[in-house]
Structure formats: structure tokens, C-alpha cells
Image (spheres, coloured by chain):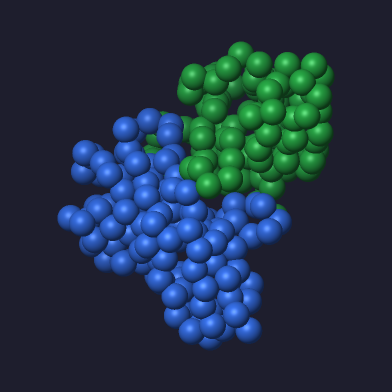
Chain colours: A green, B blue
Amino acid sequence: ETGVTQTPRHLVMGMTNKKSLKCEQHLGHNAMYWYKQSAKKPLELMFVYNFKEQTENNSVPSRFSPECPNSSHLFLHLHTLQPEDSALYLCASSQAAGTLAKNIQYFGAGTRLSVL
Amino acid sequence: AQTVTQSQPEMSVQEAETVTLSCTYDTSESDYYLFWYKQPPSRQMILVIRQEAYKQQNATENRFSVNFQKAAKSFSLKISDSQLGDAAMYFCAYRGNTGNQFYFGTGTSLTVIP
């Protein structure tokens, strides 16, 4: 148990659905991250939040909408997804991003998303 | 942009034997950090070991050690006395001294044969 919890573990949705992924960390960290993990590809960083402010958006389509209401919670709102968006979505947290680069990221177990 | 390459999609090792997983990276930075993460079937990524580029001494954590060759931009992971619980995907990762990004390789799937 790394102290980062993601729900749901599995999600199946149609292309017209709206759903949200949730991430919660109990580590007192100030930075949170969303990654997309697809088979045979490197992890793709999607968003970074540092002290509740979004600091990175790696050209992610607008059908993915992040929300960080506080330093402990991170959401990824999904709308009008495509089948190619099917993947494992991982959340991570660390101490403040951009400082002391040796900070370690702690990962959740991910949400396996299937878009039909 | 930095890239991390893991050239071995799959590896296998006999229980109690030693295995080495390869990782190379490309960067123009002089100060950075390297990591090996393990992702078991439970999917939760767990840090195995890390290395600061300014340190010449190779990092060691119990049965896990690295061979860090800065000039060659190589960062291999050696697992000694392999155990069944070591079976997992292993990801090599890079982080520069500034910025928010970690760069990951494509992973190596390790099978441990009883």
C-alpha cells in the first residue's frame, strides 16, 4: 500500500458517457499527477498539479478534464471518449513538484478504462 | 526531449539466480535522477531503487543494485537471488533536476521460473 488510492479499479463506458476517476493520497504531498499507461508504450504524463494549481498539461485532448479541489484529491473527468482512450490511468503524488528533483512519486493501482 | 529506452521487452530468470535489466537514456543535462520502478500484477508501481547522477557510487537496496555508467548513459538493474515475488514489469525512469516530468521506458516483463 503506497498511500495513494484510486477508484474505481475498473470502468467500462460508452463514447457518449460522462464519468470521473478519483485519486486520493494520504501522504501529505503537495503535487499530484495523472498518467496514461498503454500497452508497449512509455507512461504518458497527462497533468501535474502543484499546490492545487495545474502546472503541466501535455497536449491532452479536452475530453479529459482534471480537477484538484485540494492537495489530497485529484479527479479526471471523462466526456465523449474514443476507443483509443482505453488504457490504465495512473495517479501519483509527490512532495512539491519542481523542487528537489529527487522527490519520489508514489503511485496508485490505477483505473483500467475500457471505452466501447 | 529526454528519452528512456528499455531494449528487453521480456526477461526470465531461474529462482535464486541473478538477472540484469538494461536501460539507456538520452539527455543533455548533467544533473538528474534515475529510478527503477516495479509494477506487479496488482498494478501498483513501487519504487525499487534510485540513483542521483552526481553520485559515482552505485545505489544498492538489499538484493537490488544498479550499474550506473554516466558517460554511456546506461542504468542497469541487477536482481540477485531472484524470488518468485520479483516477477513483475520493471520500468526505468528519468527525472531532470528541474521541471515536473518523469520520463519512463516501455518496461521489461520479468518472469521468475521456480
The quarter of the picture where residue A103 lies is top left
| Quarter of the image that includes the C terminus of chain B | bottom right
Q: Position of residue B63 (x, y in %)?
A: 48, 76
Q: Is residue B76 left or right of residue B86?
A: left
- Quadrant in the rendering for residue B7: bottom left
- Residue A103 visible in the picture: no
Q: Residue at x 28, y 58 (%)?
A: B74
Front in this rendered view, residue A68 or A59: A59
Q: Name the residue located 40 percent from the left edge and 71 percent from the top edge.
A: B20
* Snapshot quadrant of residue B69: bottom left
In percent of width and height, residue A66 lies at 64, 21
Residue at the image point whose x is 78% and y is 43% from the top: A9
Asked whether A81 or B37 is in front, the reply is A81
Residue that appears at 27% across and 66% down:
B57
Up/down of B59 relative to A34, above or below? below
Q: Position of residue B95 (x, y in %)?
A: 38, 42
Can the viewer see residue A111 in this picture?
A: yes
